[in-house]
Structures are given as structure tokens and as C-alpha cells.
């Protein structure tokens, strides 16, 4: 069994359900410290964050970004094997986190060890940043680390996130940006009453319906460069007492906007509330800003990644800004150019999550080649 497969298995065996790191970062820190990395543990609340660096000086700073936490496995009996007992069957490694993203983390570690062994005096700095708070609330993970870095003036030029991004074969997609995410909890106030006497009540469902229709029908924009148009989706509506003869006194609506760089969260909030006010609603709204959009323009990072991925997949990669969010949304505002490259994402968060062993064994070389193109020749 190869080194990267062994390390991935060791990480899967630690049930690091968010935000519990379950000892993953300590194991990684021990390995990287032995390879000459400086180690810093940044713990905020119940969240572990690891910052491991090698090199110094005025050269470029390249950060590999990942997370050690995983989502809950769900019913254990639904899995073909225990989700926290890694198992290889027919050339596929199964276990919670196999794809998202303990394989990427293991590949990062092996690639970093190989890089500093081959290039002990490399220009600039190479670093690994890990958190145990990516799959959860993402409040005390990379968000908080980025705040600390901002205060102390920590510079990051390039960031490679190892999230599973490939579609069919390793390296067929290069993510060069992400949409922003803005969530809302809307409460519409009415007056409860009997359905037979609507004149004595005020139905918040009836009042809110035209406003919600306006929000969902609006075309927010036509897209931005490689970004799709901004989208608003209602994810939950709840009202009523459970009785069919009671007009509810309150309606709660959850909705989310995935938006491109045409917008900021502040502008979208103002636009949505203007629509709610225009429909005369008595409402309260709570906004949660998950992260602003980011986009990496052409430059050394995209050029190096495009060349390496073309070698691995046999074709030029698709360059995309789709998908959900990642922790790169907290690193990009520091001035870093960010990309995402990782294994195939078909099984992430699913029962019997898995990664092809052949892909996993090639992954460290992919990251090593990226580091060599960016730092060894800098």
C-alpha cells in the first residue's frame, strides 16, 4: 500500500465529525515537523486549525488549504462497510472523508514532504493550512484564521484548495472562483384567527406570497465572465398550528442567494428588503453572509494549474466558477489568487463515499508539480 493511501486510511479511521478533529492535525503536524516545517496550532472555540510553514524571505507564498472534519455518516447500516474503517474493494477506497477531503489532505502532506526534500532551499514559503470547521458553521475555522492573519500581516500570494472538484477523471476541472452565498431567515408577522372570520385576522401567508413571487421571478443579472447568473432559491416555508381552521400569526421563510461579483452581500440585502417593503409586509429578517464571491484572473497560478492538469487528464481542464462554497472564500480577501483542484466529487457526502486508489496515488504528484512550477523556479 502506497504512502498516500496509508495516510488517507489513517485519517479516515479518525472519526472527525465536524468540528472534532479527532487527532488528525496532531498526526499531520508530527510528520511535517519531522520534515522541517514550523508548526503553529491555532485553536478557536472547539475548532482546531493547523498552520505549517517551510521557507522564508521575500519570495512568493503558496498555501495548500484543506480541512480534516467530515460530515456525519448517517445510518451505519446503510454503508457496505463501517464508514470509519477504511476498506479497499476493487481498486476503490471507501470511508467517510475518502473524497471530501482526507485524500486531498493526505496528498498535500506527501507532496509537501517530497517538495522540501527535493528543494530544501526553495524560494519563498510553502504552507499547509487545515481546519476542523469547514463542514459545519465555518465560524472558528479559516474565517477566524484569516482574521488573525490580517491582524499580523501574514501574506498569501497563491492558494490551492484540495476540495474534490474533478467531474469524471482526475484533473478534468479547474475551479478558478466561487459564487458568494447569502442566507436569510425571513419572519412575516400577521394576526392569528379563525379561518371563518378572515376579516378579524391577517394571514401572513397570503401577504407574503406576492413578495416571494417577486423575489423568485426577478432576474438579478445575466452572469459575470465565467460566473452563472445570480440565483435566489427558497429552501423552506413554515407556518400554522397544524390545524386547518386556524389562520397563522406568523410565517417563516428560509432562502439563499448564490451570487457573482456583480453584487456584494450588502447590496443584495438592500435590494431584497426593498421588495419586501414594497409589498407592505410587517417583517423581520436575519441575514447570514457565508462569503463574498472571488475570481482568480489569468496569471502564474492559473497558467501552472492549466498545464499540470492537462498532463494528468489528457485534455485542457474545464475552468469553472460553479459549485457551492469553500474556505478559499476567506483566503481570497487577503489578496491571494485561489484555485481548487482535487479528486472526483461524485460520492461526496454520500453513503459509501469513496475515491479511486489509482487517482489517490497520482494526486501527490499533481500537487508536487504545481509547487515546483510555482516555487522551485520562482
Image (cartoon, helix red, strand yellow):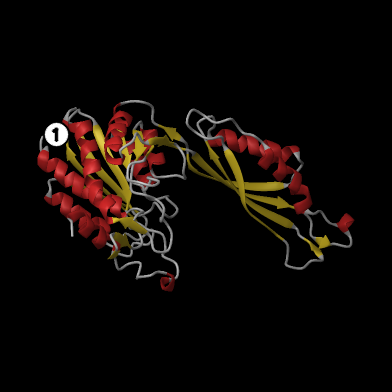
Q: Is residue 372 left or right of residue 72?
A: left
Q: Observer-nearest residue: 180 or 147?
A: 180
Marks counted in the figure total 1
Residue 111, above or below 25: above
- Picture coordinates of residue 59 (x, y %)? 20, 28
Name the quarter where the C terminus is drawn: top left
Read off the residue under disc 1: 122
The residue at the point 14 percent across, 34 percent down is 122
Quadrant of the rendered structure where residue 178 is? top left
- Which quadrant of the figure contains the N terminus? bottom left
Q: Is residue 38 above or below residue 68?
A: above
Q: Nearer the viewer, residue 44 or 268?
A: 268
Vertical arrangement, residue 309 with respect to residue 86, above or below: above
Q: Secondary structure at mark 1?
A: loop
Q: Nearer the viewer, residue 264 or 232?
A: 232
Relative image position of residue 75 (x, y in whole percent): 45, 70
**In the rendered image, is residue 31 in sight?**
yes
Residue at the bottom extreme, as displayed: 77
Can residue 42 be seen here?
A: no
Q: Residues within 10 Å of mark 1 (few under 14, many from 20)?
A: some
Amino acid at each position: 500500500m502506497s504512502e498516500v493511501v496509508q495516510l488517507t486510511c489513517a485519517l479516515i479511521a479518525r472519526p472527525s465529525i465536524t468540528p472534532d478533529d479527532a487527532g488528525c492535525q496532531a498526526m499531520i503536524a508530527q510528520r511535517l515537523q519531522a520534515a522541517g516545517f514550523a508548526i503553529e496550532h491555532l485553536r478557536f472555540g472547539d475548532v482546531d486549525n493547523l498552520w505549517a510553514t517551510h521557507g522564508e524571505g521575500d519570495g512568493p507564498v503558496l498555501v495548500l488549504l484543506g480541512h480534516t472534519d467530515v460530515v456525519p455518516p448517517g445510518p451505519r447500516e446503510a454503508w457496505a462497510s463501517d464508514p470509519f474503517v477504511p476498506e479497499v474493494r476493487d481498486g476503490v477506497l471507501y470511508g467517510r472523508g475518502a473524497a471530501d477531503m482526507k485524500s486531498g489532505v493526505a496528498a498535500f502532506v506527501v507532496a509537501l514532504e517530497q517538495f522540501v526534500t527535493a528543494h530544501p532551499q526553495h524560494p519563498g514559503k510553502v504552507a499547509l493550512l487545515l481546519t476542523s470547521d469547514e463542514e459545519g458553521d465555518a465560524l472558528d475555522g479559516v474565517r477566524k484564521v484569516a482574521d488573525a492573519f490580517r491582524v499580523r500581516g501574514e501574506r498569501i500570494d497563491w492558494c490551492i484548495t484540495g476540495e474534490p472538484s474533478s467531474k469524471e477523471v482526475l484533473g478534468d476541472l479547474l475551479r478558478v472562483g466561487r459564487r458568494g452565498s447569502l442566507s436569510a431567515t425571513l419572519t412575516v408577522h400577521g394576526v392569528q384567527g379563525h379561518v371563518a372570520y378572515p376579516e378579524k385576522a391577517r394571514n401572513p401567508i397570503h401577504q407574503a406570497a406576492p413578495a416571494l413571487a417577486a423575489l423568485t421571478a426577478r432576474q438579478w443579472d445575466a452572469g459575470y465572465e465565467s460566473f452563472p447568473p445570480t440565483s435566489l432559491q427558497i429552501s423552506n416555508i413554515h407556518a400554522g398550528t397544524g390545524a386547518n381552521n386556524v389562520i397563522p400569526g406568523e410565517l417563516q421563510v428560509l432562502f439563499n442567494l448564490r451570487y457573482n461579483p456583480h453584487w456584494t452581500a450588502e447590496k443584495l440585502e438592500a435590494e431584497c428588503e426593498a421588495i419586501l417593503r414594497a409589498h407592505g409586509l410587517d417583517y423581520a429578517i436575519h441575514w447570514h453572509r457565508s462569503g463574498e464571491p472571488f475570481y482568480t484572473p489569468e496569471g502564474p497560478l492559473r497558467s501552472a494549474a492549466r498545464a499540470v492538469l492537462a498532463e494528468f487528464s489528457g485534455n485542457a481542464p474545464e475552468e469553472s466558477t460553479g459549485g457551492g462554497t469553500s474556505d478559499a472564500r476567506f483566503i481570497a480577501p487577503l489578496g491571494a489568487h485561489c484555485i481548487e483542484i482535487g479528486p472526483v466529487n461524485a460520492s461526496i457526502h454520500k453513503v459509501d463515499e469513496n475515491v479511486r486508489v489509482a487517482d489517490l496515488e497520482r494526486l501527490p504528484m499533481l500537487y508536487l508539480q504545481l509547487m515546483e512550477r510555482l516555487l522551485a523556479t520562482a
